[in-house]
Image (cartoon, grey):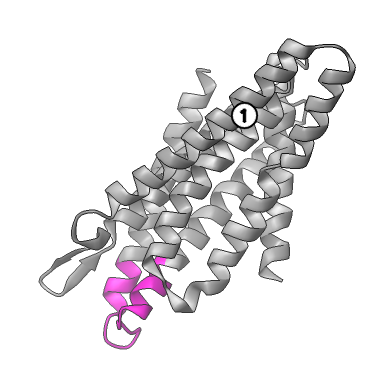
C-alpha cells in the first residue's frame, strides 16, 4: 500500500516536472525525461544514504514508499529508451547519441553527488548533535530543508510554465509542501522513538523537533518559491 501511494505521488510529480520542462524548453530534445532522471538520480543517492544509513526499523514503510514507490515512478528509463528510439527512427543520430551520453553520464554523476552529500552530512557524530539530554538530528533536518527548497523551486518554475488556473496551482503547491513537511517531521519523530525517546518522558523534545522541522522546511520552501520565480 505504501509503495502504491509513493508511486502515485512520484508519477504525478514526474508528469508536472516533465510537462513544465517541455513547456519551458520545447520538445526538440527529450529535456523533460532527462530532467526527471537527473533530479531523481541525485535524490535517490541522497535519500538512500540518509534513510538506509539510519536504519530506523519502525520507519521501514517510509523507505519503501520513498525509494521504491516515489523514486521508482518519478524516474523513467522506459521513456528515455522510447524517446531515444524515436530520435533514431527520425534520423536524428546526433540527438540520440547526445541523449544516451548525457543521460548516462549526468545520472551517474547525480547519484554520486547525492551519495557524497548524504555521507558528508552524516560524517560528524552520525548526523546527530547531543547536548544536555537533548538530541538534534541535524543531518536529517538538512536533508529535509534541501528537499523543501527543491520542492519550492520546482513548484514555482513548473506552475508558472504549466497552463492551469490559479486556484489549482495554489492547491497543488499547498498540498505538496504540506504533505512533505508533515511526513518529514513524522520521520524525525520515528527516528527519535527508535533511539529510545518516549512521548511520556520526552514530549517536549519530540514536539520541539517536530515543530522546528516544520518551520525550517516552510522557510526553505518559501526560499525555493522565490528562487524559482527568478528562473
- Which residue is at a point 42% across and 51% down the rendered structure image? 144
Task: State the image coordinates of residue 69 (x, y, percent, origin top left).
Answer: 66, 59
Instruction: Please say whether residue 189 is one of the residues in the magenta stretch.
Output: yes
Q: Nearer the viewer, residue 110 or 174?
A: 110
Residue 2, above or below 228? below
Residue 209, above or below 84? below
Q: Nearer the viewer, residue 142 or 101?
A: 101
Task: State the image coordinates of residue 209 (x, y, percent, origin top left).
Answer: 32, 64
Report which quarter residue 141 is drawn in.
bottom left
- Which residue is at a point 37% across and 79% down the rendered structure image? 194
- Which residue is at a point 55% across and 41% down the rendered structure image? 41
Task: State the image coordinates of residue 137 (x, y, percent, origin top left).
Answer: 29, 62
Residue farthest to the right? 89
- Which residue is at a point 33% across and 72% down the rendered structure image? 206
Task: State the image coordinates of residue 183 (x, y, percent, origin top left).
Answer: 52, 62
In this image, 132 relative to 153: left or right?
A: left
In this image, 147 relative to 134: left or right?
A: right
Q: How many marks?
A: 1
Residue farthest to the left? 132
Residue topped by disc 1? 103
Region of the chain picked out in magenta, as a range: 188-208
Quarter of the picture containing the N terminus is bottom right
Q: Main secondary structure of the magenta part?
A: helix
Residue 210, above or below 173? below
Residue farthest to the bottom? 200
- Check disc 1: other Cα within 10 Å, few if <14, some if 14-19, many if 20+: some
Element at label 1 = helix
Q: Nearer the viewer, residue 58 or 100?
A: 100
In this image, 225 relative to 49: left or right?
A: right
Amino acid at each position: 500500500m505504501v509503495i502504491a501511494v509513493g508511486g502515485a505521488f512520484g508519477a504525478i510529480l514526474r508528469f508536472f516536472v516533465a510537462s513544465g520542462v517541455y513547456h519551458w524548453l520545447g520538445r526538440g530534445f527529450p529535456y523533460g525525461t532527462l530532467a526527471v532522471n537527473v533530479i531523481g538520480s541525485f535524490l535517490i543517492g541522497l535519500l538512500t544514504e540518509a534513510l538506509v544509513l539510519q536504519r530506523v526499523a519502525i520507519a521501514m514503510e517510509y523507505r519503501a514508499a520513498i525509494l521504491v514507490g516515489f523514486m521508482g515512478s518519478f524516474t523513467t528509463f522506459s521513456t528515455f529508451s522510447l524517446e531515444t528510439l524515436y530520435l533514431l527512427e527520425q534520423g536524428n543520430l546526433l540527438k540520440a547519441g547526445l541523449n544516451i551520453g548525457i543521460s548516462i553520464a549526468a545520472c551517474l554523476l547525480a547519484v554520486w553527488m547525492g551519495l557524497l552529500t548524504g555521507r558528508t552530512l552524516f560524517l560528524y557524530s552520525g548526523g546527530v548533535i547531543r547536548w544536555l539530554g537533548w538530541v538534534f538530528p541535524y543531518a536529517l533536518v538538512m536533508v529535509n530543508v534541501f528537499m523543501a527548497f527543491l520542492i519550492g523551486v520546482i513548484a514555482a518554475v513548473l506552475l508558472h510554465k504549466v497552463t492551469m488556473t490559479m486556484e489549482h496551482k495554489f492547491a497543488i503547491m499547498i498540498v505538496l509542501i504540506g504533505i512533505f513537511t508533515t511526513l518529514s517531521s513524522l520521520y524525525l519523530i520515528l527516528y527519535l522513538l527508535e533511539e529510545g525517546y518516549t512521548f511520556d518522558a520526552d514530549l517536549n523534545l519530540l514536539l520541539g523537533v517536530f515543530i522546528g522541522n516544520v518551520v525550517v522546511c516552510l522557510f526553505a520552501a518559501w526560499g525555493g518559491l522565490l528562487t524559482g520565480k527568478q528562473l
